[in-house]
Amino acid sequence: MIRMEKGRFLAVFVAVVLVLGTVGFSFSSPSGTPDIIFLSSRIDPASATPGGNLEFNVITQNWATIPADNAVLRITLPDDLILKDSGLKEISVGKICSLCNFETKYSLKVSEKAVSGEYKIKVHLSWDGGSRERDFTVSVSGTPKVVVTDISYSPEKVEPGESTAVTLTVKNIGGAPALNGALGLTIPTLTGDTKQRFSIIGSGTELAIGTLSVGESKTIVFELAADDNVEAGVYNFPATLSYSGTSSSTGIGLVVVSRAELTLPKVQTDPVTVKPDKPFLLSATVENSGKNEAKSATVRFVIDDSRFSGTKSAYLGTIKSGDKDVALFEMTYAGPVLSKKDVPVAFEVTYVDDFGEHSFTESGEITVDAGISTDGGISPIAIGALVLAIAVGIWFFFFRKKKGLPSGKRV
């Protein structure tokens, strides 16, 4: 019985094997129809990086008992995967014999703009009477990269004791999100100083950015103030962009400007009392009480009086903060002058500083007295007095003669 059972079991087993073999053969290789499959692929490296290279190999096989004629292999890539040899986009394979393998190797370049993620490579094989297509997945692991794309100031220049609004735009140009982004500013102490002359109003030196997705930009606005005693100049502040456990260095510049402040406190002459028709030296003292130097300082004599002649413009150039200079004019004042008097004078002062060109007018007086003219003769007033004396003498002489009085006798 046991043998019978064994014999029956053996008979059933053989029958099942024969049936399955027949069915399997009919599915795997239909009579008269090529059947091409993609056996395997190789992607190296397994995870590519933006800007890197990628090797992609694919193996196909004709699993049928008859050849596949006029086979053509095509590859379709996403924009960020670039085929180094464009001629391999479509390959004419020709005939693929029965049970033959066909391997194709592709060298790819990953775009520097590629972001982290999965990319699909589509491979399509066609032949007479059929076709087959398959997608292959390529992984790209990008890294974040945050940069400063724009910076502006309002106002563009700041005076000592004032502040400016700094607007900073950052962007993630990398291939992966930038996490926990922050901007750290370093406010240095100026050389030879013990006090920080700059500060950020309303916040510390660490400014949060947060997370930046690929291609995303964010704007940071903060108020940067300058101390009252900061000198004019260009100042640079080191800055650090930190994100995703990494960091990069950048910097922020600030232009500090200050004004020149010119005054004309004193006008004098040499000699102190001017004589008509005699040359004299007119001087105007110019002082700079501002915090910046005055450039191209010029003093012009602008009084509208034709009796003044001589040099009427003096170029002083640069007057530094706290310094002074003197404008000199060699002049003559034409007579006649009946009596000693004060004559008005006026000067226009122009100069340039960080805020542009400036001008102002200052008035004064000089003292003019009657005197001898420049040619050594008698002045007009003296001549007039002499003529008057002669006239009085003549009149007196004839008056006495008419009265019959001897000359030299009092009337």
Image: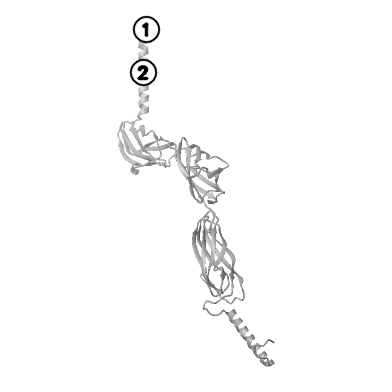
Residue labelled with disc 1: 2
Q: Sequence-wise, which precedes: disc 1 or disc 2? A: 1
Identify whether 381 is placed above or below 343.
below
The three-letter amino acid code for the residue at tag 1 is: Ile
Q: Nearer the viewer, residue 191 or 6?
A: 191
Mark 1 lies on a secondary structure that is helix
Q: Residue 22: x and y, percent?
A: 35, 24
The image quarter in which residue 72 lies: top left
Which quarter of the rendered picture does the C terminus lie within? bottom right
Q: Horizontal placement of 172 versus 364: left or right?
A: left
Q: Residue 238: x and y, percent?
A: 47, 43
The image quarter in which residue 269 lies: bottom right
Q: Residue at x 56, y 64 (%)?
A: 267
Residue labelled with disc 2: 15
The image quarter in which residue 82 lies: top left
Q: Is residue 106 visible?
A: yes
Which quarter of the rendered picture does the N terminus lie within? top left
Q: Nearer the viewer, residue 99 or 175?
A: 175
Q: Nearer the viewer, residue 28 or 223?
A: 223
Return the residue found at the far top.
1
Q: Is residue 177 visible?
A: no
Q: Residue 57: x and y, percent?
A: 34, 35
Pointer 1: residues within 10 angstroms few (<14), some, or many (20+)? few
Mark 2 lies on a secondary structure that is helix
Q: Residue at x 37, y 15 (%)?
A: 12
Q: Residue 281: x and y, percent?
A: 52, 68
Say how the picture is coloured. one colour
- The alpha-carbon separation of the residues under discs 1 and 2 comes to 20 Å
